[in-house]
Amino acid sequence: TRYLTHGNVTIPGVDDGEEFQNTVKAMQIMNMSNDDLNSIFRTMSAVLQMGNMQFKQECNSDQATLPDDTVAQKVCHLLGIPVKDFVGSILKPKLKVGRDFVTKAQTQAQVDYAVDAISKAIYERMFKLVVTRINKSLDRTKRQGSSFIGILDVAGFEIFQLNSFEQLCINYTNEKLQELFNHTMFVLEQEEYRRENIDWEYIDFGLDLQPTIDLIEKPMGILSLLDEECLFPKATDRTYVDKLINAWAQHPNFGKPNYKAPADFSIIHYAGKVEYSIDQWLMKNMDSLNGSVVALLQTAKDPFTCKIWKDGKV
């Protein structure tokens, strides 16, 4: 599957089949029935199959087409939705123009992004439901302030030769976590020494990451400007990076691109300088869901699919 092509890693001493069985046992311990497990695995299979749909571009046209709908049939069977409506909604989604709805043919790139967006949304909703079920099983008391176990699993800091929107999101998360660690270990700990009247001379470790975090998350920061630019119909990646440079060129942790360099800007993170390319950032940030496909999922014959889409958010 296309979605797993970057994850084919073999670890000595680790048996994927055995790990899967351990996962199933753990889910059963959390009071998940066989029907629950089948629904979850069926949904996971549908997401993975979505990555295998191969759209093509029509000859003499920019319009996308799906020459072979075999994989699409598998997806629709797993989700409980009609394949003809699903494929039609992907290739020619309905758009609201004034008070009317019209269908608009999509390019291959638009279709690929639409499928990726809907598959990520399905996975996210399924994952949240699993977490909710686990929390419900672990909740043995209604007392306020009851104990809990928190588990955090995030991707490590990423620095490639050229980095995109995904790397910014990952590195931003790591920056926030590192700042929390620094503040807890080096600032709050020393404040506790002072409260306990411990003879201690305050040490500034010089590990304040807030300037970089502000650059990314504050109003008019990198993410805020990106959200704003996505609202303009004629906005492009280039108009976005121009605004970014105008706003932050003087920031000590923001770097303007070198002449003819492939990167569009750089950020000095705690782990080092990272160069970013803004290619397709607007499209990635919007990650808009196809409303026609969402409507199909909300009315699917499969109860689990309906359940995770019942809120109707697009």
Image: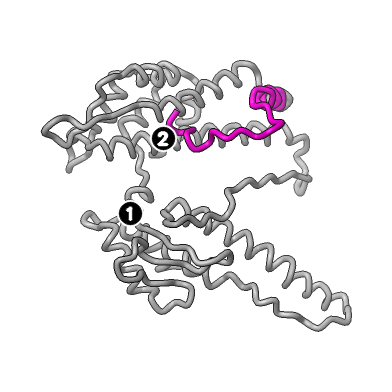
Compared with 148, 133 (above or below) is above
Residue furthest out toward the front: 12
**Residue 196 vertical position relative to residue 7 in the rendered view, above or below:** below
The residue segment tinted magenta is 1-26
As shown in the figure, which amino acid type bears the numbered disc 2? Gly
Residue 141 image offset from top left, x and y in percent: 78, 37
Question: In the rendering, which numbered label is found on residue 36?
Answer: none
Colouring rule applied to residues: one colour
Q: Which residue is denoted by mark 2 in the rendering?
A: 312
Q: Is residue 110 left or right of residue 171?
A: left
302 magenta-colored: no
Residue 83 falls left or right of residue 298:
left
**Side of 314 relative to 88 (left or right):** right
- Estimate how packed mark 2 is, as few (under 14), some (14 to 19) or many (20 or more) residues with alpha carbons within 10 Å: few
Q: Is residue 257 above or below residue 62?
A: below
Frontmost of labels 2 and 1 is 1
Residue 195 in picture, x, y percent from top left: 83, 76
Q: Position of residue 228 (x, y in %)?
A: 34, 60
Q: Which residue is mark 1?
A: 279
- Can residue 31 be seen here? The reply is no
Q: Report the side of 243 relative to 118 (left or right).
A: left
